[in-house]
Amino acid sequence: MRTGTRALRLGDYNQQVVLELVRTRTATSRAELAQRTGLTFQAISKIVRRLVASGLLLEDTSREAARTGRPPTVLRIDPTAAYALGVHIDRDETAYVLVDLAGTVVERERRRTPRRGGPSRSADQIARVTRQLVERSGVERDQVLGVGVGAPGPLDPGEGILDNPGGMPEWGRVHLKKMLVERIGCDVAVDNDAVAAAVGETWNGKAHDVRNLLFVYIGWGLGTALVLDGQVYRGGAGLGGDLYHVPIDPGGPLCPCGSRGCVGQYASPAAILEDVRRRSKVRRHTASRPGAAPTPSSYGDVCRVAVNGPSVERDALVHAATMLGLGLLGVVAVLDPDLVVLGGAGLEAARPIYESVIHRTLTERVPLPGQRETRVAISDAGSDVGAIGAASLLLHNTYAPRFTG
């Protein structure tokens, strides 16, 4: 599936800046763009003319007439100018989306992640389903920039190599980008699912108007990502922003990393399920009546019970969300993000609990002089946040200024 031959790819930094300002509604007229960028009105007019001619921008004169009697021309992006495919690979399920330039989902699909055959069968499935999404949408293939993939870490985003992703023992070290390029024949971007989700939130989500973001992804596992000054922060070894192995209780359970009381030992779905089993066992031993409720067999079961009222499951989830909030406190105190966003299929299943507990944990401490209260939000992308974010990797790479990582 050859893609992207008709979708304009910007190489000029000033064009990228102008497109970004219009896309985020920061500036929507030539005069506003000149004021925001410091470029001359003539330079802005030339850039806008080029972007309109390319089909990326539209001119709209429907705004109410200004006091001078002359209606200003309002600029907006044309969402049909380009599209991107997004794929999110999780242990049990793979999510697919096709989004337009605005980040709006045009088509979506969900499939079981192949258990047998490992990465080869997954790559075959990705090639097949992404092709079907484009055909079903009616979008011309040459308007599609490529395929973005979000996957569990650890991985090398530059080479698109997954290195023994958690919960997927058959995968080992996988050159996923190379496999997909061979099968699909288009541009492919591969990144950590939490990073992809964070990028998606900055493109068309709760963080579209912020420069500093802390994103928490809860799916089969737990991941976090940082966007600082508009760019993904990875750190020296590519682990910047990763909370999983941050110790918050020196007397806590032993973690595979060798430390005790790491955030992941409390807040990951696997840890929550184990905590429910432990609490259920204790309750059965101490209950005065026989016939205790059966122990949930999955994290999804835990969430379904927890949101319906007081229970062992609810106690475990509240505890996990509290410990996650405590881990986030350290990052918030050091980096002072504009916004903390939480998302993922695992969070959606128990959204009210996570939202209230983490917000309370992050805001109940009185800010010191000069500090501000931390804003906390839940992603509107729901369980598609990873796939939408993966598609946004292509949109960012092509059109956003100063996006590096």
Image (spheres, grey):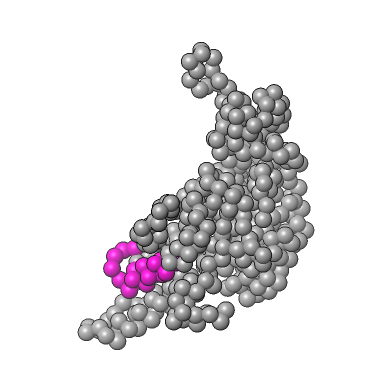
Where does residue 315 sit, x and y in percent of width and height?
A: 33, 71
Please say whether residue 342 is one of the residues in the magenta stretch: no
Pick the residue in front: 365 or 32: 365
Residue range (magenta) = 307-324
Is 309 a magenta residue?
Answer: yes
Q: Is residue 87 above or below residue 324?
A: above
Give the image location of residue 385, x and y in percent: 53, 54
- Please say whether residue 121 is visible from this viewpoint: no
Left or right of residue 113: residue 183 = right
- The residue nearer to you, when weighing 117 against 159, is 159
* The image quarter in which residue 352 lies: bottom left
Taking the image as shown, residue 234 lies to the left or right of residue 291, namely right
Relative to 243, does residue 399 appear above or below in the rendering? above
Residue at the image point whose x is 66% and y is 24% from the top: 41
In-front residue for pair 249/122? 249
The prevailing secondary structure element of the residues shown in magenta is helix
Give 279 or 140, whichever is nearer the viewer. 279
Q: Residue furthest front?
A: 369
